[in-house]
Image (cartoon, grey):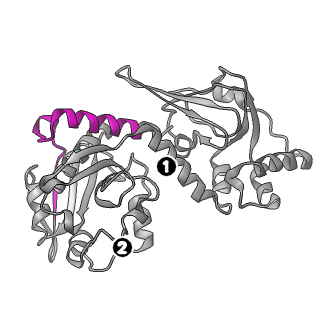
Amino acid sequence: MTDENNLLSALENSPGQVALRASGLAQMALFADCSADQLMALAERLRPVRADPGQVLMRQGEPAVFFILVHSGACEVNHFGDDGEVFFDSVGAGVIVGEIALLRDNPRTATVIATEALSGYLGDDKAFGVMADLPGVSERLLRTVRQRLAAFISPITVDFAGGAELMLRPVLPGDSERSNHPAVEFSADTLYRRFMSTRAPSSALMNYLFQVDYVDHFVWVLVDGADGPVVADVRFVRDAEDPTVAEIAFIVADDYQGRGIGSFLMEALAIAAGVDGVQRFTARLLAENHPMRAILDRFGGEWQRDEPGVVTIEFEVPAQDRLRIDPKLAHDIRTMARRVLRASVN
């Protein structure tokens, strides 16, 4: 039996047991906006778990059977790369682990080991659905994801023409608000070229654009200062039928255009795509979007007319030796892409 199956036990759903689990959940900051009654449905779907220091809770490569809500204690998350590189993160009370691999039905990409006496709750994908619908929980889960990802990355400083010093990192939850910073302007013309509309994207579209999974939807952003606004982003969205193909798009704020940012972001995206197994890029844009067409022309492919005023292109993700990025910078970008991918699928 696997470590995960060994942790599973018969679920006791007597009223007293359910009420006891609901009481324990109510003590967690994650459920600060929930009443005891609202937690009962979730408590019915969770199993209590306890682990001693050194006990393996999840093992890299095994099927994902459950997630864990850590009520007390601590554990360590370790990823062992094919190249022998090891990444680890410490997780304490109030944190959820293992949910992403479970929800995607993927094997574990990390091993989780209790480092202190640990207590918590196990749940399956249905329990996660119940939990996510509780008041305030989705927002707190997003913050947790942001903190988890931030622990794996350090933004990379990049110098551009005109003395601009910006920081490259993967998009994080909350960046949709940073894209609306009053000091950063995306003109009607810029929005039109990117979204084929002069109107600013709706809140629903912004949520889609910035709440990503880093596997099927990967986004780099450039920020002006560690806590500054998002001034540019580039993304790929993997094709649902052919995971080796992904559609790309990018946008650069008006005051930052003409400094080589678009070309740099495309190369950074190509590096992330290579890490993530994407082999071909496609793009669909306005025929009059000459700046983006000029950038993409570097990578080959032929433009095809899609509809009046709109063209498409498909080309191979450029190999490392075709990139103009400094090799040291390319190495740092590749390392960060690997780390965020590993952090996002545990």
- Please tell me whether residue 44 is drawn above or below residue 85 in the rendered image: below
Q: Which mark is residue 20?
A: none
Sooner in the amino-acid sequence: mark 1 or mark 2: 1
Q: Which residue is mark 1?
A: 146
Location of residue 112 (image quadrant): top right
Disc 1 from disc 2: Cα separation:
23 Å
Q: Residue furthest front?
A: 163
Query: Residue 260: in sight, yes or no?
Result: no
Q: Which residue is mark 2?
A: 201
Give me the residue at 56% from left, 26% from top.
59
User: x%, y% of residue 155?
Assistant: 34, 44
Mark 1 vs 2: CB contact within 8 A: no
Total of numbered circles in the picture?
2
- Please tell me whether residue 337 is drawn above or below residue 186 in the rendered image: above
Give me the residue at 57% from left, 39% from top.
98
The secondary element bearing badge 1 is classed as helix
User: x%, y% of residue 303?
Assistant: 10, 61
Identify which amino acid the numbered label 1 is placed on.
Arg
Query: Residue 211: in sight, yes or no?
Result: yes
